[in-house]
């Protein structure tokens, strides 16, 4: 489900690069072909993950048509999510172990950590 982007949030950029920039098939260094911006909320604050997407420059190589993204992005969040793993684990623990309600989770996230999630977003993640 698409969510509106908040206008008054101060986003911190984090640049992510592919860990191994060499093509597995032809042994050439891959080139940056595009960037992807992924906005997430974490307990460290709102962040924009700027991911460098790469592909092989050799047109005869099979990896020329593939796009590779940084593996570190999955260590911070899942694709298409707007929260980090730390917020997700906090939500899961409070919801499952302590049986907190969704409005209670939302209020605590906003008051304690400044994470502005809607109730339907919290329901989707849980």
Image: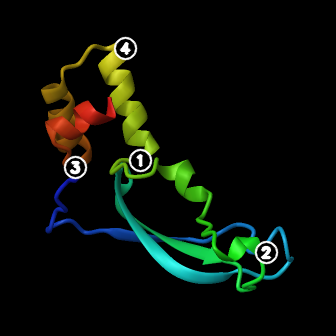
Residue at (27, 35) in percent of width and height: 124
Disc nearer the start of the sequence (3/2): 2
Quadrant in the picture for the C terminus: top left
Instruction: State how far apart marks 1 and 4 are (Cα).
Output: 20 Å
* Residue closest to the eye, 117 or 23: 23
In the picture, the disc for residue 114 is 3
Q: To which residue does mark 2 refer?
A: 22
The answer to whether 9 appears left or right of 96 in the picture is left
Mark 3 or mark 2, whichever is nearer to me: 2
Q: Residue at x 17, y 36 (%)?
A: 120
Q: Earlier in the sequence, mark 2 or mark 4?
A: 2
Give me the disc on residue 74: none
Q: Earlier in the sequence, mark 3 or mark 4?
A: 4
Question: Is the Cβ of the residue at disc 1 closer than 8 Å to that at disc 4?
Answer: no
Q: Residue at x 35, y 47 (%)?
A: 83
Under circle 3, the secondary element is loop
* Mark 4: few/some/many CA within 10 Å (<14, 14-19, 20+): few
Residue 55 in the image, given as x and y percentages of width and height: 65, 76
Q: What mark, if any, has residue 97 been given in the picture?
A: 4
Residue located 21% across and 30% down the image: 105
């Amino acid at each position: 489900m698409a969510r509106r982007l908040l206008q008054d949030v101060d986003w911190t950029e984090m640049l992510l690069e592919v860990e191994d920039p060499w093509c597995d098939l032809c042994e050439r260094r891959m080139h940056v072909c595009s960037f992807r911006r992924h906005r997430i909320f974490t307990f460290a604050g709102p962040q924009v993950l700027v991911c460098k997407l790469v592909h092989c420059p050799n047109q005869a190589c099979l990896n020329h048509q593939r796009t590779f993204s940084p593996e570190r992005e999955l260590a911070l969040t899942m694709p298409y999510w707007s929260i980090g793993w730390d917020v997700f684990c906090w939500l899961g623990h409070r919801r499952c172990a302590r049986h907190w309600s969704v409005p209670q989770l939302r209020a605590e996230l906003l008051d304690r950590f400044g994470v502005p999630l809607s109730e339907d977003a919290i329901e989707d993640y849980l």
